[in-house]
Image: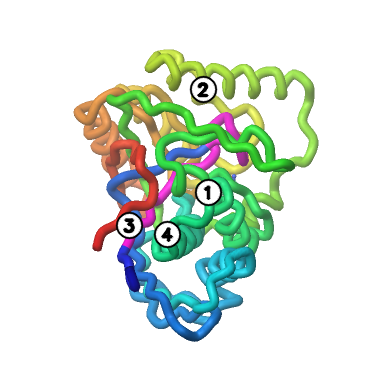
Amino acid sequence: MEAIKVFCPATIANVSCGFDVLGLALDSVGDEMTVRKTVKRGITISKIIGQDLPLETSKNVSGVAGLAFLEKSDYNGGFEIEIDKRIKPGSGIGSSAASSAGAVWAMNELLGRPFSTLELVQFAMQGEKLASEVAHADNVAPALFGGFTLVRSYEPLDIIAIPTPTELFATVIHPQIEVKTSDSRKILKTKITLEKGIQQWGNVGGLVAGLFQSDYDLIGRSLEDHIVEPIRSILIPGFDDIKSNAIKAGALGGGISGSGPSIFALSKGEEIAKKVAESMHETYQHIGIPFDVHISKVNTQGVKILA
Ligand code: HSE
């Protein structure tokens, strides 16, 4: 195989209680990327449509992730990348992760899968480091493994794939304002009280147990964030109303998607997810900021081959 076209999913990182450790992949939102083998060594980004992003390899997240891949590979050639960028940078649904994960996944396929998924996560994390100054894995892990993932440890990297209850749907509203992950990390406190820690790890355990047991009520009860949401939500106009109205419309719970400004809600079944989308439309149209709303099943596959 000389070339491959892939779908690179958008992702919801943190999933309320799991800052930097929990994430899930979406099915209906993502970028498309074509990767070709080249005789010339190195990574060339030949075309980006949809967004104004750098073509220069060292300044583009897919270029940097690709270079990390090549550095560990014994392949003597290189790759050319074309990106149809459908996820806006700074939207909070893993724009940089989709490009980083898609690039290394496609390269691995083209070479007959020399690397494990965990190794691909490590390469893709270099793209995240370029984008947000921190090599966090909570977007690239679900993009590559699919479904929900837990980063149990960063040193050494240990990622747990968590089963997805079949009826779980996500509704995401993206207010069209840009929040840079690097900026929204700088405003966070670096110390927490024991009391907040106890609340938070109770919820992380509850959410993981709820996902394993397909216990939708437990999932909903666990979608609480006592540490990051109270600080970051101030940057997102209408956050409290969107969240409380989504829950009134039947959502299990929700919160900030990644570092925002997108806001997500999880629901049991597509019908409720649609009602939640209507409530988000209704709530946000009074705020005066353009927005779009997506409904998606959880993507249990991760990056997928399109052609
Ligand atoms: N865990 C990261 C953060 C995700 O919240 O900063 C960014 O998408």
Residue 116 tag number: 1
4 vs 3, front mark: 4
Dot 4 corresponds to which residue? 112
Lower sequence index among marks 1 and 3: 3
Looking at the rendered structure, the kind of residue marked 3 is: Phe
Which amino acid lies under the numbered mark 2 shown in the image of this protein?
Val
Q: Are marks 4 and 3 in contact (CB under 8 Å)?
A: no
Q: Which of these two is toward me, 21 or 6?
A: 6
Quick check: is the Cβ at mark 1 less than 8 Å away from ligand 1? Answer: no
Residue at disc 3, secondary structure: strand
Residue 53 counted in the magenta span: no
Q: Provide the residue designation for mark 2.
A: 208
Circle 3 Cα neighbour tier, 10 Å, few/some/many (<14 / 14–19 / ≥20): many
Point out the tag, 2 or 1, that comes first from the N-terminus: 1
Residue 123: image location, x then y, percent: 59, 58
Label pair 1/3, CB-CB below 8 angstroms:
no
The residue at 47%/43% (across/down) is 142
Pointer 4 or 2: first along the chain:
4
Q: What is the spatial separation of the Cα atoms under label 4 and label 2, in whole angstroms? A: 33 Å
Residue 274 x/y as whole percent: 22, 34
SS of the residue under disc 2: helix
In the image, what residue occupies the spot 31% across and 32% down? 169
Position of residue 48 in the picture relative to residue 194 (left or right): left
Q: Name the N-terminal-most of marks 4 and 3.
A: 3
* Image position of 171 with respect to 64: above or below: above
Amino acid type, callout 1: Ser
Residue linked to disc 3: 7
Residue 90: x and y in percent read 50, 59
